[in-house]
């Protein structure tokens, strides 16, 4: 009878549906995915849940500004979030939305139970309120008069509200910390919670609002909606079937959660508010909360207003999914904020993936095919160089387990890559190309190549949680499916064709393409209010009609089309336009457009653009302004 697998329930913080997530927001899901894949590899029965947080005043305001209902707004953004998560090859088992009917009903029952047992009471709140963070603060908690979490302006707010008695559970929470020293990591986060929030005394928590309507209503007081922290935090139990009266079998199997993966900015909510909600419900507390650092752009927090936001779909388009995953999981330290720029990603890609790993795999498999027709067997003898390599491999496996079990992802990747570097050094030490020239060196050459292939197999297995697609490609080239982290598990190799895994990136070329795309996006941004101009200034713009003779997509630039235009000037004009998301070439060929014909030429993704065509921003996207029926070359006034 087979032994039942040990369960491992892991969650991410659910993403707020105010806007499409940037690469910093996506670190949560990539880190959690690495852990989930590793745990599955170790034989755990993993359940991995993520989702979207969809209620609140900010959503209501954004929906009103967009002229849609809040539900229509969150449907769109939640879809974007899921697209981003899927685009990073994440292996979640469930995606919960806080607008899911079962979640809303369960949250109503949770709120009612806590109210009926006296843990929630009605009062009045007066204080400073941050709309983006949906949080109240006292004057003393503000930093320079602004929100201590996001640094934005706060507003005075006073309204009737329901409160959760945090103070009632303060001593019980401290005892839980003492009894479970590994509850919060890194340890610095725990010290911050105790010293900054718990020791000064916990104020009771506002858990309802009456100044907006987009939320789960309090079913016994319809003037109020349930405030974000009971609504959003409860997803970790409602998503697996919790209900106050009749919890599901899945809930009984999975709860308590083994690991919440969250950003450091919401540790307070997950290690103070959430445990107290669970204590009040009489439910077990999560075993571990991992508060990871932020991913910064250079040295700054990403912000749309600063123009330094990077999106994962742009990164994966230029560099590939595994390159983005590798960067995030290898370059973000355990306790300190990490940084990403296009330049740093290219440098890490070329150094680690193309040079160290890709080159090792390619030349080892190519030599096996060249010298042995693709087949080598386990060595009969082991010399000192072999012993050093094998010892390094075994030590690497031990360090790998230790760092992965403690969620030190960057340390783990660094350990793996050190073995890859050692393998490259082993090639230099053993000089297989010289052994191949000596008939007496044939047996030694077999042993060298086997040791290399076996180490590459171990590298592929250890890298699977980090770069799963590339790991699978390496295993396919090795011609093996043995995924045991044991040097003795493989007895022979029959390799397949050596195919390059990571082509070196031409930094100058790719950075120019990215800059061109950014220029297009900025030129299409209709949010900026432009200054007034005079009639004389407008007269300097030469607008003409032109016929689209030809049109094609610009390679490696998903938003760009290259148009060839005729305006009767005797010379065709090339214009690059960022309309590929809305038009195909066949939509445009033969059409008459309006072109700014005296615009200074600019190079976009390797193509010189000699103008700009006129288009309008509409609620349905960009619409080109056509002038069909008007002779080409006509001046537009």
Image (cartoon, helix red, strand yellow):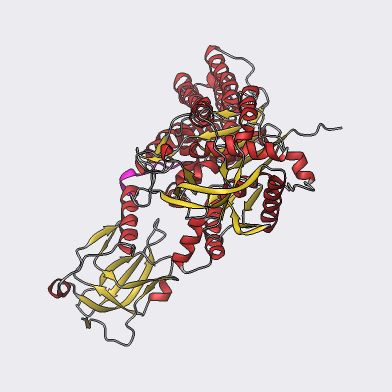
**Residue farthest toward the front in the current orientation of the protein:** 123
Q: Residue at x 72, y 43 (%)?
A: 117
Q: Position of residue 409 (x, y in %)?
A: 53, 31
Residue 567 lies left or right of residue 82; in this view the side is left
Q: Residue at x 66, y 49 (%)?
A: 94
Q: Where's the N terminus, which quadrant?
A: top right
Q: Residue at x 32, y 59 (%)?
A: 522
Task: Report which quarter residue 336 is drawn in.
Answer: top left
Q: Report how many numbered discs are placed on residues in the image.
A: 0
Out of 240 and 375, give the one closest to the viewer.
240
**Residue farthest toward the bottom in the current orientation of the protein:** 629
User: Is residue 431 among what the camera can see?
Assistant: yes
Out of 414 and 354, give the one closest to the viewer.
414
**Residue farthest toward the top in the current orientation of the protein:** 384
Residue 245 lies left or right of residue 585; in this view the side is right
Q: Is residue 287 above or below residue 130?
A: above
Q: Position of residue 58 (x, y in %)?
A: 48, 56
Task: Confirm whether the magenta stretch covers residue 507.
Answer: yes
Q: Where's the C terminus, which quadrant?
A: bottom left
User: Is residue 496 among what the camera can see?
Assistant: no
Task: Report which quarter residue 91 is drawn in.
Answer: top right
Range shown magenta:
501-509
Task: Confirm whether the magenta stretch covers residue 179.
Answer: no
Out of 447 and 538, give the one closest to the viewer.
538
Residue 57 lies left or right of residue 233; in this view the side is left
Out of 623 and 358, give the one closest to the viewer.
623
Q: Position of residue 327 (x, y in %)?
A: 46, 38
Q: Is residue 285 above or below residue 520?
A: above
* Dominant secondary structure, magenta: loop
**Residue farthest toward the right in the current orientation of the protein:** 1
């Amino acid at each position: 009878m087979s032994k039942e697998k040990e369960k491992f329930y892991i969650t991410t913080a659910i993403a707020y549906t105010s806007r499409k997530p940037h690469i910093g927001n996506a670190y949560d899901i990539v880190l959690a995915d690495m852990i989930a894949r590793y745990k599955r590899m170790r034989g755990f029965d993993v359940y991995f849940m993520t989702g979207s947080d969809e209620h609140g005043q900010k959503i209501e305001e954004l929906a009103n500004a967009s002229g849609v209902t809040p539900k229509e707004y969150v449907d769109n953004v939640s879809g974007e979030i899921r697209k981003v998560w899927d685009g990073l090859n994440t292996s979640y088992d469930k995606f919960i939305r806080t607008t899911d009917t079962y979640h809303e009903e369960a949250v109503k029952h949770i709120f009612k139970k806590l109210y009926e047992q006296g843990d929630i009471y009605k009062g009045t709140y007066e204080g400073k309120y941050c709309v983006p963070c949906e949080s109240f603060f006292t004057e003393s908690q503000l930093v320079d008069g602004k929100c201590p979490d996001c640094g934005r302006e706060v507003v005075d707010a006073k309204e009737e509200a329901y409160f959760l008695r945090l103070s009632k559970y303060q001593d019980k929470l401290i005892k839980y910390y003492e009894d479970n020293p590994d509850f919060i990591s890194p340890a610095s986060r725990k010290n911050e919670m105790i010293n900054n929030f718990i020791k000064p005394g916990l104020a009771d928590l506002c858990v309802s609002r009456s100044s907006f309507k987009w939320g789960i209503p309090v079913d016994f007081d319809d003037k109020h909606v349930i405030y974000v922290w009971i609504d959003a935090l409860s997803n970790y139990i409602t998503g697996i079937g919790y209900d106050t009266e009749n919890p599901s079998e899945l809930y009984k199997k999975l709860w308590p959660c083994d690991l919440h993966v969250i950003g450091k900015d919401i540790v307070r909510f997950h290690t103070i508010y959430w445990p107290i909600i669970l204590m009040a419900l009489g439910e077990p507390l999560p075993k571990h909360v991992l508060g990871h650092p932020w991913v910064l752009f250079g040295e700054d927090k990403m912000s749309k207003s600063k123009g330094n936001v990077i999106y994962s779909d742009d990164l994966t388009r230029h560099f590939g999914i595994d390159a983005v995953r590798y960067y995030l999981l290898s370059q973000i330290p355990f306790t300190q904020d990490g940084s990403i720029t296009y330049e740093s990603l290219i440098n890490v890609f070329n150094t680690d993936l193309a040079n160290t790993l890709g080159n090792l795999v390619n030349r080892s498999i190519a030599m096996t095919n060249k010298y042995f027709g693709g087949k080598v067997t386990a060595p009969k003898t082991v010399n000192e160089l072999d012993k050093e390599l094998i010892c390094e491999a075994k030590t690497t496996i031990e360090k790998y387990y230790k760092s992965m079990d403690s969620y030190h992802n960057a340390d783990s990747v660094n350990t793996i890559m050190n073995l890859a570097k050692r393998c490259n050094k082993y090639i230099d030490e053993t000089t297989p190309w010289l052994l191949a020239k000596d008939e007496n060196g044939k047996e030694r050459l077999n042993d060298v190549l086997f040791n290399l292939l076996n180490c590459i197999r171990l590298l592929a297995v250890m890298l699977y949680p980090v770069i799963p697609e590339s790991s699978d490609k390496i295993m396919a080239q090795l011609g093996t499916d043995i995924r045991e982290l044991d040097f003795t598990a493989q007895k022979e190799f029959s390799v397949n064709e050596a195919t390059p895994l990571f082509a070196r990136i031409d930094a100058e070329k790719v950075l120019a393409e990215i800059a061109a795309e950014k220029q297009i996006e900025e030129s299409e941004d209709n949010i900026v209010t432009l200054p007034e101009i005079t009639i004389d200034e407008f007269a300097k713009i030469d607008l003409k009609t032109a016929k689209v003779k030809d049109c094609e997509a610009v390679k490696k630039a998903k938003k760009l089309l290259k148009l060839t235009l005729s305006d009767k000037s005797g010379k065709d004009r090339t214009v690059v336009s960022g309309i590929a998301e809305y038009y195909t070439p066949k939509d445009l060929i033969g059409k008459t457009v309006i072109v700014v014909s005296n615009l200074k030429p600019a190079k976009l993704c390797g193509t010189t653009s000699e103008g700009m065509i006129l288009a309008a921003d509409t609620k349905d996207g960009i619409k080109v302004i056509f002038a069909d029926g008007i002779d080409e070359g006509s001046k537009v006034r």
